[in-house]
């Protein structure tokens, strides 16, 4: 695995964060299947190395914008289980007081400007955040997460043009999981995705999105350069979603095979790969890793129980937080 230089604490934090995302998603899926969660949600399982590898290179002062498949970004940027599950269940103690739900979680205390249910909807927000940083002379960088399907949105090309002209400290992170809803990316996206950024003079890179250390090593370099005024940058992260486009998409055989899913899960799983790396390099033992997994399972279980019992917002708040004061 390609990597930046880290100590044992860094490695274990990255592993812990990936397992936290996977565990959160497993529990969220069960909440939906048991009819305890309202609305719809989109699982991030399988893509954990992308969110963690990138967010590990950021500080709380750095900002991200997320997508409708945004749980992983939220957790990787520091979100807590209790507030996350409360938000999914529409409870008052959620990050948006239960009013945002799965696709609209924000946590500005950790620089998360919010998930967005509109495909590509956060591209302008991220670029505006980077412009703000440049105008104020601050040192923060913004990362804009979006899927390969969002590269069909004209907004991306408008903001990349502006970012390139003004050398903004923004990194466009395209999570290419191989499918735009129910269609293979190669069937709807002509040519190279990275070439689209290069057309604007933006340096673009492709990286194995299942290798958390490779993702982190590249992001560390680009974040450092963006802080020096050398941005913007574009990264295409080759990854895979284990679930369907959304939780109700359970009959996937008509657009992708079970053999394909099995191959990614058994041979390219980011958590399995990183666990093997930690053990082989003597960073952690199997027993230590099992203990981390068990601890996270308990944290998630406790948070789910807490969220299920938590109160809903008072109906009198229905008109609150619709507009900024």
Image (tube, grey):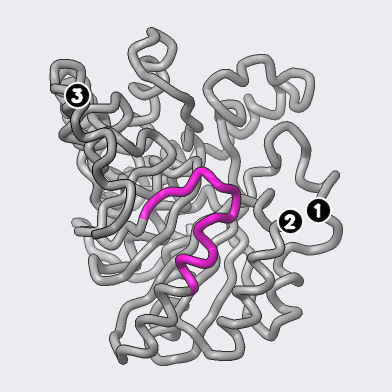
Q: Mark 1: few, some, or many residues within 10 Å (few <14, many ≥20)?
A: some
Residue under pointer 1 = 189
Residue 121 location (% of width, % of height): 54, 55
Task: Indicate the quadrant containing the C terminus: top left, top right, bottom left or bottom right.
Answer: bottom left
Q: Is residue 278 above or below residue 127?
A: above
Splitting the image into 4 quarters, where does residue 315 fall?
A: top left
Q: Mark 3: few, some, or many residues within 10 Å (few <14, many ≥20)?
A: some
Mark seen at residue 152: 2
Residue contact at pointers 1 and 2, CB within 8 angstroms: yes
Q: Work out whether residue 268 or residue 64 is closer to the camera in this orientation and state it.
A: 64
- Residue furthest to the top in view is 34
Give the distance between the C-alpha atoms of the residues marked 3 and 1, in whole angstroms: 43 Å
Which secondary structure, mark 2? helix
Q: Work out whether residue 261 or residue 69 is closer to the camera in this orientation and state it.
A: 69
Left or right position of 322 against 200 = left
Left or right position of 63 against 197 = left
Residue under pointer 3 = 312
Q: Is residue 117 above or below residue 112?
A: above
What residue is shown at x 50% (from left), y 42% (from top)?
68
Q: Mark 2: few, some, or many residues within 10 Å (few <14, many ≥20)?
A: few
Magenta-drawn segment: 114-127
Left or right position of 264 against 122 = right
N-terminal-most mark, 1 or 2: 2
Which SS type dominates the magenta stretch?
Answer: loop
Mark seen at residue 261: none
Give the distance between the C-alpha atoms of the residues marked 2 and 3, in whole angstroms: 38 Å
Give the distance between the C-alpha atoms of the residues marked 1 and 2, in whole angstroms: 8 Å
Q: Is residue 45 above or below residue 176?
A: above
Which secondary structure, mark 3? loop
What residue is shown at x 19% (from left), y 56% (from top)?
9
Q: Does the image show residue 147?
A: yes
N-terminal-most mark, 2 or 3: 2
């Amino acid at each position: 695995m390609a990597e930046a230089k880290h100590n044992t604490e860094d490695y274990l934090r990255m592993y812990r964060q990936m397992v936290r995302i996977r565990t959160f998603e497993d529990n969220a899926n069960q909440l939906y299947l048991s009819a305890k969660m309202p609305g719809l949600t989109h699982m991030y399982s399988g893509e954990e190395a992308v969110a963690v590898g990138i967010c590990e290179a950021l500080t709380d002062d750095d900002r991200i914008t997320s997508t409708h498949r945004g749980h992983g970004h939220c957790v990787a940027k520091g979100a807590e289980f209790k507030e996350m599950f409360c938000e999914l269940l529409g409870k008052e103690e959620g990050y948006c007081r239960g009013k945002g739900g799965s696709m609209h979680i924000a946590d500005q205390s950790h620089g998360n400007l919010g998930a967005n249910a509109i495909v590509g909807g956060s591209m302008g927000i991220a670029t505006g955040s980077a412009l703000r940083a440049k105008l104020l002379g601050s040192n923060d960088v913004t990362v804009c997460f979006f899927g390969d399907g969002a590269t069909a949105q004209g907004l991306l090309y408008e903001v990349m043009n502006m970012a390139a002209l003004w050398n903004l400290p923004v990194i466009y992170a395209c999570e290419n999981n191989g499918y735009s809803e129910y269609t293979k990316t190669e069937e709807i996206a002509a040519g190279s995705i990275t070439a689209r950024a290069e057309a604007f003079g933006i340096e673009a890179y492709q990286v194995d999105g299942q290798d958390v250390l490779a993702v982190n090593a590249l992001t560390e370099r680009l974040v450092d350069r963006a802080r020096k005024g050398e941005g913007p940058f574009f990264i295409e992260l080759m990854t895979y979603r284990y679930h369907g486009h959304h939780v109700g998409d359970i009959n996937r055989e008509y657009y992708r095979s079970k053999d394909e899913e099995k191959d990614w899960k058994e041979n390219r799983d980011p958590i399995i790969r990183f666990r093997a790396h930690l053990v082989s390099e003597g960073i952690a033992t199997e027993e230590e890793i099992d203990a981390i997994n068990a601890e996270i399972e308990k944290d998630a279980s406790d948070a789910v129980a807490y969220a299920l019992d938590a109160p809903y917002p008072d109906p009198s708040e229905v008109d609150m937080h619709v507009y900024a004061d």
